[in-house]
Image (tube, rainbow, N blue to C red):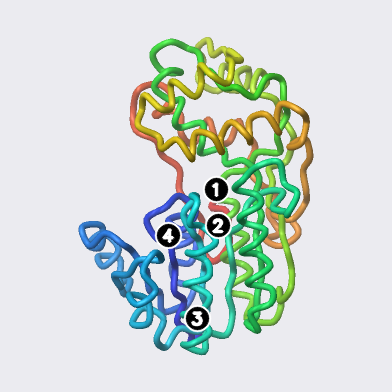
């Protein structure tokens, strides 16, 4: 495949899984990163690393030169729409042919979260950009549970402010598998498509705890907590106030039933059933028992099972 793919957010969860999924798929991979100290592991894998910052549009042209396809991920934050605008403008100036954008579940102008509303602005911009485009709006990442791994390992409990809400949570590796298939299928096959990757079932966190118990062979309990308690905990860990407020908005939406759905998009595009929560728990059992998390991605859109 004689195409150059620029991957933004290259050190993040989904982009990292995408890099793994695209191994040996024929793309010339290029990564845009902001922190030069994180470049060496990518270069060691044969990836062309360019330093640039989506906050700074003048830093972007060298990274976009000669690019055919753009995997676009922008940081969650108040400047998300600006970051997207800077990337799309650089892509247009460089004659990029296609952008595959990672958006957010339920992105809409009337979404119950500030993140969803900002993503809706960026989705609209991409769709009107004149570029080929595909948008992915994934559900809640199973990988978010890794933030609770220490509590699960040491106390056998985890605390979230989602009450009894059920979510069609998805493994980030399956998001990457879908994205890899979209990219390797060529620039026209998925043009003007919006996909919403989810897992195979909508599940509440009490059920998540029960499945973890079975996999880990140790007691695990979900403890619903109040918004203010959760916010104080996150702020104590140094999470920025804007992000904490956004997470509370999502938690309230999920508690109301907003996330209680699934789609067949992962299986329809990749031909593989997405991982369930038990699969995720098995692949990361070490993290939830005090070790180091594991789990790998497949190649060229396969899920590796």
Give the distance between the C-alpha atoms of the residues marked 1 and 2, in whole angstroms. 6 Å
Number of the front mark, 4 or 3 = 3
| Residue positioned 44% across, 30% down in the render | 147
Snapshot quadrant of residue 223: top right
- The mark found on residue 59 in the picture is none
* Left/right of residue 117 with respect to residue 215 in the rendered view: right
Q: CA distance from mark 4 to mark 3?
A: 15 Å
User: Of label 4 and label 1, which has the lower sequence position?
Assistant: 4
Q: Nearer the viewer, residue 95 or 301?
A: 95
Label 2 near label 3: C-beta < 8 Å? no
Circle 3 residue: 91
According to the picture, the residue beneath numbered tag 1 turns out to be: 172
Which residue is denoted by mark 4 in the rendering? 9
Q: Is residue 109 left or right of residue 229?
A: right
Disc 1 + disc 2, Cβ < 8 Å = yes
Q: CA distance from mark 3 to mark 2?
A: 22 Å
Sequence-wise first label, 1 or 3:
3
Front position among marks 1 and 3: 3
Q: For the residues carrying marks 4 and 1, which lies nearer the camera in this image?
A: 4
Residue 99, position in %: x, y?
58, 74
Mark 4 closeness class: few <14, some 14–19, many ≥20 residues within 10 Å = many
Image position of 27 with respect to 304: above or below: below
x and y, in percent, of residue 87 in the image: 48, 72
The label shown at residue 176 is: 2
> Which of 31/156 is in front?
31
């Amino acid at each position: 495949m004689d195409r150059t793919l620029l991957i933004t957010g290259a050190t993040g969860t989904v982009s990292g899984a995408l890099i793994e999924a695209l191994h040996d798929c024929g793309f010339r991979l290029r990564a845009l990163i902001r922190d030069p100290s994180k470049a060496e592991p990518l270069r060691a894998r044969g990836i062309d690393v360019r330093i640039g910052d989506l906050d700074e549009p003048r830093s972007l042209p060298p990274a976009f030169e000669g690019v055919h396809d753009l995997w676009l991920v922008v940081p969650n934050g108040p400047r998300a729409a600006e970051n997207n605008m800077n990337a799309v403008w650089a892509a247009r100036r460089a004659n990029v042919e296609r952008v595959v954008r990672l958006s957010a579940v339920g992105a809409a102008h009337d979404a119950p979260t500030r993140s969803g509303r900002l993503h809706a602005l960026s989705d609209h911009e991409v769709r009107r950009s004149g570029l080929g485009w595909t948008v992915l709006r994934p559900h809640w990442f199973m990988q978010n549970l890794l933030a609770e791994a220490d509590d699960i390992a040491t106390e056998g409990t985890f605390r979230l402010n989602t009450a009894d809400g059920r979510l069609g949570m998805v493994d980030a590796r399956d998001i990457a598998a879908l994205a890899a298939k979209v990219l390797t299928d060529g620039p026209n096959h998925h043009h003007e498509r919006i996909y919403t990757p989810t897992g195979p079932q909508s599940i509440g966190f009490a059920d998540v705890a029960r499945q973890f118990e079975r996999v880990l062979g140790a007691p695990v309990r979900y403890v619903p907590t109040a918004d203010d308690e959760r916010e104080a905990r996150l702020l104590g860990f140094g999470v920025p106030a804007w992000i904490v407020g956004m997470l509370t908005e999502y938690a309230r939406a999920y508690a109301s039933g907003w996330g209680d759905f699934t789609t067949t998009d992962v299986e329809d595009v990749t031909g593989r059933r997405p991982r369930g929560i038990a699969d995720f728990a098995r692949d990361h059992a070490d993290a939830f028992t005090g070790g180091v998390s594991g789990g790998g991605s497949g190649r060229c859109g396969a899920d590796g099972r």
